[in-house]
DNA sequence: AAAATGATCAAG
DNA sequence: TTGATCATTTTA
């Protein structure tokens, strides 16, 4: 188990989006650690990408952390009720990042069950377990990720990503990004990546 | 199929 | 200041 270093995040955004699959997200702020295996991501590629919050160089209080260099967390709130976790990428100031869309629960499931359903882990139905972290808003609820993580350095101790086993093999599939129909010529690019046949991918 | 629900942003 | 939008989830 090895924490990903700065150079990982400084790579090209599409590379990071693919390479994050199979890595382990750690949340260690105020409870016992919660760990999830990343199984689904989407790339948002800065000023040219009409789906990206930083499209056309848009720079506001919300998007400010996207202009940090790679290896920071970007958290935004959507539809008034859900948070989404992104990983800032690149070595420039372009405003690029990767949305984490699906996690496979690995550790800290008791805490996740409480956060997401206010229930004990062993009281959850099969359906509830399956739906615990298979979506960007769901996984943030389960891991208690909100704006307190916005701008956090992923090389720190509160939120970070590790590689466990380099021999872990899986098939990577790609497809169109979800719910960005407004993005015109960018709405159909295959910048969503996921581990094939993993049940914690948000959509089939 | 449609409601829930409020921060965000660009326009005025 | 305001109105439309929205990288979602849940319920029906």
Image (cartoon, coloured by chain):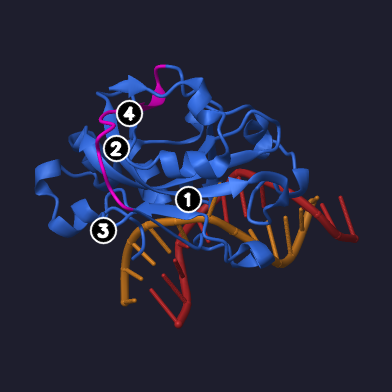
Chain colours: A blue, B red, C orange
User: What crowding class fits label 2: few (fewer than 14 Cα within 10 Å), some (14-19), or many (20 or more)?
Assistant: many
Left or right relative to A109: residue C1:
right
Residue named by callout 1: A81
Q: Earlier in the sequence, mark 4 or mark 3?
A: 4
Q: Which mark is residue A182?
A: none
Asked if badge 4 and badge 3 are on a common chain, one would say yes
Find out whether the residues at labels 4 and 3 contact each other: C-beta distance under 8 Å. Answer: no
Element marked by disc 4: strand
User: What crowding class fits label 1: few (fewer than 14 Cα within 10 Å), some (14-19), or many (20 or more)?
Assistant: few
* Residue A35 point in image, percent of width and height: 28, 32
**Of marks 4 and 1, the one in the foreground:** 4
Q: Residue at x 14, y 56 (%)?
A: A126
Residue named by callout 2: A36
**How far is the residue under mark 4 from the one under mark 2?**
12 Å
The magenta segment is A157-171
**Of marks 3 and 2, the one in the foreground:** 3
Residue named by callout 4: A163
**How far is the residue under mark 3 from the one under mark 2?**
17 Å
Q: Residue at x 18, y 36 (%)?
A: A110
Quadrant containing the N terminus of chain A in the rendered view = top left
Q: Earlier in the sequence, mark 1 or mark 2?
A: 2
Given residues A118 and A89, the one toward you in this image is A89
Asked if one can make out residue A163 in the rendered structure from this viewpoint, the answer is: yes
Element marked by disc 3: loop
**How far is the residue under mark 1 from the one under mark 2?**
22 Å
Snapshot quadrant of residue A38 = top left
Relative to B6, say whether A159 is above or below. Answer: above
* Residue B7 point in image, percent of width and height: 60, 44
């Amino acid at each position: 188990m090895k924490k990903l270093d700065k150079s990982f995040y400084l790579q090209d955004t599409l590379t990071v989006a693919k390479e994050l699959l199979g890595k382990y997200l750690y949340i260690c702020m105020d409870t016992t650690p919660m760990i999830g295996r990343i199984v689904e991501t989407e790339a948002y590629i800065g000023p040219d990408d009409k789906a990206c919050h930083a499209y056309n160089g848009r720079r506001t209080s919300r998007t400010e952390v996207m202009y940090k260099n790679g290896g920071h967390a970007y958290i935004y709130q959507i539809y008034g009720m859900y948070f989404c976790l992104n990983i800032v990428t690149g070595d420039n100031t372009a405003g690029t990042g990767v949305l984490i869309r699906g996690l496979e629960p690995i550790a800290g499931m008791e805490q996740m069950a409480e956060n997401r359903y206010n229930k004990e882990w062993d009281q959850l139905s099969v359906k509830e377990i399956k739906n615990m972290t298979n979506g960007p808003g769901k996984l943030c609820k389960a891991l208690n990720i909100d704006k307190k993580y916005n701008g956090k350095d992923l090389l720190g101790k509160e939120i970070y990503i590790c590689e466990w086993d380099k021999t872990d093999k899986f098939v990577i599939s790609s497809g169109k990004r979800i719910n960005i129909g407004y993005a015109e010529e960018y709405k159909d690019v295959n910048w969503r990546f996921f581990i094939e046949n993993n049940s914690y991918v948000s959509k089939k």
